[in-house]
Amino acid sequence: MPQSDRDRVYLGHMLDLARKAVQKSAVVSRAEYDRDEDLQMVLTHLIQTIGESARRVSLEYQTAHPEVPWHRIIGMRHKLVHDYLDVDTNIVWDVATVELPLLLPVLERLAAEA
């Protein structure tokens, strides 16, 4: 399925931000993350923005690529934006260290197909 220029831009943005989040979380331990409020905020912002970019990818493209967990990514964005007083830093850490490393190869493949 051909991508629109808009889909290409937002997919590329998701990939760039996912790489940044993975890189930032790969060089610290969980204990360091727990003590570093700045890193917690940075990872939260990166994940939120990945969700915002995913939300802007066309429904047609999302439907054509069910290998990307669009609903979960966008849902995480909604949680971070609208329930910001109750952000679970454990979940943010898991997304940055487990979920995003699994998502990266998928995003890289899709971006290469552009």
Image (spheres, grey):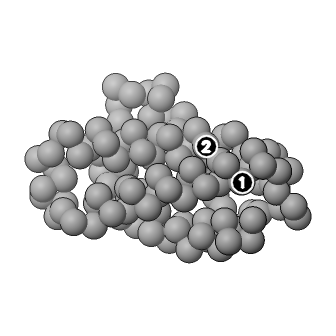
Q: Earlier in the sequence, mark 2 or mark 1?
A: 1
Q: Position of residue 103 (x, y in %)?
A: 54, 66
Crowding around mark 2 (Cα neighbors within 10 Å: few <14, some 14 to 19, many 20+) is many
Discs 2, 1 touching: Cβ within 8 Å: no
Residue 47 showing in the rendered view: yes
Residue 53 badge: 2
User: In the visual, does 12 lie left or right of 89?
Assistant: right
Coordinates of residue 97 in the picture (x, y in percent): 35, 64
- Residue at x-position 82% and y-position 50%: 4
In the image, residue 48 lies at what x, y percent? 47, 40
**Residue 86 pos. (x, y %):** 35, 31
Which quadrant, please, contains the N terminus?
bottom right
Q: Please rate how many residues cluster around mark 1, counting C-alpha atoms within 10 Å: few if below 14, some from 14 to 19, many from 20.
A: some
Please, what is the three-letter code of the amino acid marked with disc 2?
A: Ser
Is 37 rendered above or below residue 32? above
* Residue 20 drawn above or below residue 59: below
Any part of residue 75 in sight: no
In the image, is residue 105 above or below residue 55?
below
Which image quarter holds the C terminus?
bottom right
**Residue under label 1:** 8
Q: Secondary structure at mark 2?
A: helix
Mark 1: amino acid: Arg
